[in-house]
Amino acid sequence: MVLSATESLQDWDLMQIINGKEIEMPSPLLKHQRISRILQRMIEDFLIHSNLGELFNAPLDVIFEEGINRVQPDLIYISNENKDIIKDWIRGVPDLLVEVVSKGSFYIDTVDKKEIYQKYGVKEYWIVFPEYDTIEVLTLEEDGYKMFSRGTDAEIVKSKLLDGLEIKVSDVTY
């Protein structure tokens, strides 16, 4: 790889840091990418009409705490009220994060990242399970994440944070 004079290797670093430990994940498989792209399009369509904020996709670093927790969720929603965290990367706590679970990321996405997102105060966390055609929408309550909506196959999932956003699971995970 050839870098320009203004780039550094850090600009191309695709590592995530989970609780102080560097984790290198392989690139997602095709089904994962399709699901992420479809879900991104659906959420963006909703956001365009509601003008509530902006949606970003991986790979983009979300830095909760430098050197401790730097992650690359599949989708990152930042509300207009929270847009000051949008810098070179996302530096702060996004409003909503989405992870599409792969076999190799199951524990990281459902345990490690869930705990990190809860710790830092991410209001809503979506976990997509492609192998089970299931989406879970978790919302942050005083005592941690609680299931707000869960759907499989042709069922509908809803967002609490983005009131009015409804997604038919089979339209995403087909």
Image: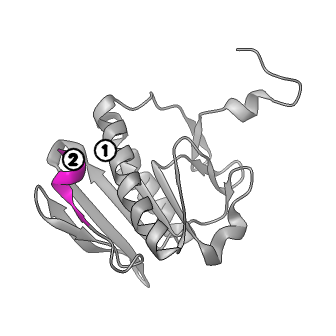
Identify whether 72 is placed above or below 48.
above
CB atoms of marks 2 and 1 within 8 Å:
yes
Q: Position of residue 81 (x, y in %)?
A: 63, 78
Q: Which mark is residue 54?
A: none
The residue nearer to you, when weighing 51 against 158, is: 51
Say left or right for 91 vs 25.
Answer: right
Quarter residue 13 falls in: top right
The image position of residue 134, as x and y in percent, is 19, 55
Way the structure is coloured: one colour
Magenta residues (range) = 167-174
| Nearest the eye: 136 or 51 | 51
Quarter of image, res 147: bottom left
In the displayed structure, would residue 143 be above or below residue 86?
A: below
The dominant secondary structure in magenta is helix
- Which residue is at a point 49% across and 63% down the rendered structure image? 117
Q: Position of residue 31 (x, y in %)?
A: 28, 35
Residue drawn at x 34%, y 34% as measured from the top left? 104
Does the magenta portion include 173?
yes
Residue that appears at 37% across and 80% down: 163
Point out the residue furthest to the left here.
154
Q: Residue tagged by mark 1?
A: 35
- Amino acid identity at mark 2: Thr
Instruction: State whether residue 102 appears in this view.
Output: no
State how far apart marks 2 and 1 are (Cα): 6 Å
* Residue 27: % across, % down: 44, 29
Q: Residue furthest top?
A: 1
Q: Amino acid at mark 1?
A: Ile
Position of the N terminus by quadrant: top right
Q: Which residue is mark 2?
A: 173
Query: Could you say whether the residue bearing mark 2 is in a helix, strand or loop?
Result: helix
Q: Earlier in the sequence, mark 2 or mark 1?
A: 1
Is residue 84 inside the magenta stretch? no
